[in-house]
Image (spheres, grey):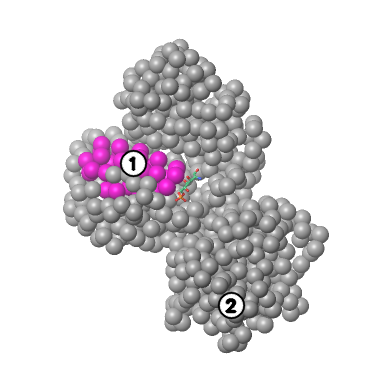
Amino acid sequence: MCGIVGYIGDQNATPIILDGLKKLEYRGYDSAGIAVYTDGNIEVRRDAGKLSRLEALVAEQPVSGPLGIGHTRWATHGVPTARNAHPHVSSTGKVVVVHNGIVENFLELREELLAEGVVFQSETDTETIVHLLEKYYSISGSMETAMLESLKLLKGAHGVVAFCSEEPDKIFAARIGNAGGVVIGLGQGENFIASDIPAILEHTRRVIFLESRQMAVVTRKGVKVKTLDGSEVSIKPSVISWDPVAAEKGEYRHFMQKEIHEQVRSLTDTLAGRVDFEEGRVRIPQLNATEELVRRVDKIILTACGTASYAAMVGKVLIEKIARIPCEVDIASEFRYRDPIVNDRTVLLAISQSGETADTLAAMEEARQKGAVIWSIVNAIGSQAMRLADGYISMQAGPEIGVASTKAFTAPLVDLYMLAILLADLRGVIDEKTRRRLVADLRLVPDLAGSCLDREADVERVAASLKDTRDALYLGRGINMPIAYEGALKLKEISYIHAEAYPAGEMKHGPIALIDKDMPVVAIAPRDPWYEKMISQIEQAKARGGIVVAVATDGDSRAAELADHVLWVPETPWMLSPVVTVIPLQILAYHIASLRGLDVDQPRNLAKSVTVE
Ligand code: AGP
């Protein structure tokens, strides 16, 4: 969950690292630090709190040098204080490390090191790594050997970046398991290291993604990659097409607001190159979905966490309706612990913005062991969820920085719709007329999203009337039931308002007892096949004195009459309606949080990529 940046070259490493950390702050933001090689020594600056505190510290106590590493932390072991912030330096001051992941056997390692006389300075698990590095460095006199020896002892999943003041021409970067990526950016006479692409995009688009159990030795002039067993690996750089400007806030107050507004573009990009409007067909070559495979499959398990799991719930409705393949949705953190029924006729479809979520990756591995075909829908290019899969759909959302996911929710909704059409086509269960109509509807998507965005001011007015509420209930049915969950999640994660979501039909089985004038009910009621049911749900909430905010289709006079506030959305084919109904809920949550003066992009306790279990 933490962010890591490293630099080696002829420039001053400090501003490059601080700037890179700024782009990664979404990964963790409870403390930050840098270590720079300066005149034969390692100088460390670190502090608790956000990166701005570290920047102020560096301004007060400047440090510069041609090589350095930096870190933003999301605490797992030890409270967020300056002492627990990374980088951690060894007792002699010669070796320094930053780390992402959890040393699962740290108590054991710590005991052994304590018995050898090591004095610990922090409560972190990471500190064991630097003491191990120092121990093996003092034995071998080689930092490369020290890295290989130390990393072998670590249990768990890790990204580790380190250097030694006695070998100031090298930075070492390693990856073990799925604790987040390690990317090496290739420059001219300089090289970069990061846990995620946005940190280095400004400098280079040529990158190497480390695989699990690989270590890179990075010098000014080049990069050598080895497995942890010491054998050399041939390097295949990838070229990233993301626009560095896309990772900046621009004219917007927050990344989340910018990302909400980017949805017209991300949805346009989602269709590009995949939809043949002339033929009325969808093509996704990277999925490697053959007719033989798709006809053999008797079950698709969609797995994901958080927002991505709500996209999965919409996907189930779409795939079952269009392709007639039975689907299950599994929260990834539950999947591997219940001995799921999976075989070679099962497809496991993982959905993940970051492609690094530990639980999602573990579900993929579990399904792989049981013989399933693994597909993924992933935003982060080159991430583990993309590489672990037999086939993938690359989300075209672009970099998403705000912790609350927005454009990386609507993109997979469209991906899943396209996937359902493709599967139906390959299985031969869709007639040409229906297929052409479903494909033609896709053309509407970017404009429909744009129309929702044009109504931001109306949604902002509703936000102003709800900003002081303490609780909210979100209700939806059918294909829009997951949108109730997503709307409630958006509200709670950035505004800290308690929000619960229910399939609307469940109201009468208990939650209706909650409704009174202090419990706003957000009812997602577009003109879809569940519309009448939702209207009667709104009537029931009104009959109990509830304040109702309806998401309704333009011109719906019944919704207008019944609801206290209406968030209008344009008329949309029902299978694509979640794309439009969610947008006002994203805007609503954004403005409520912003009116409450909260840190929208970096809400408390959260991190963008959840790389620990
Ligand atoms: C979204 O707003 C959340 N912050 C969170 O639920 C997120 O969707 C979840 O952690 C899954 O992340 P992933 O898509 O990167 O796997």
Name the quadrant containing residue 580.
top left
Give me the disc on residue 115.
2
Q: Secondary structure at mark 2?
A: helix
Residue 288, given in percent of the width and then of the height, sits at 29, 57
For disc 2, does the CB lie below 8 Å from ligand 1?
A: no
Image vertical order of residue 342 relative to residue 147, above or below? above
Instruction: Classify 10 Å Cα crowding around label 2: few (below 14), some (14-19), many (20 and above).
Output: few
Span of residues in magenta: 300-327
Residue 403, given in percent of the width and then of the height, sits at 55, 46
Q: Which residue is mark 1?
A: 315
Q: Main secondary structure of the magenta part?
A: helix
User: Of all residues shown, which one is farthest toward the bottom?
Assistant: 140
For disc 1, does the CB lie below 8 Å from ligand 1?
A: no
In the rendered view, does 325 fall on the left or right side of 151? Answer: left
What amino acid is at disc 1?
Gly
In the rendered view, does 425 fall on the left or right side of 15? Answer: left
Rounded to the nearest angstrom, the CA distance separating label 1 from label 2 is 54 Å
Residue 240, given in percent of the width and then of the height, sits at 50, 60
Name the quadrant containing residue 591.
top right
- Residue 149 visible in the picture: yes
In the rendered view, does 562 fall on the left or right side of 9? Answer: left
Asked whether residue 323 is drawn in magenta, I would say yes
Q: Depth check: 276 or 473 in front?
A: 473
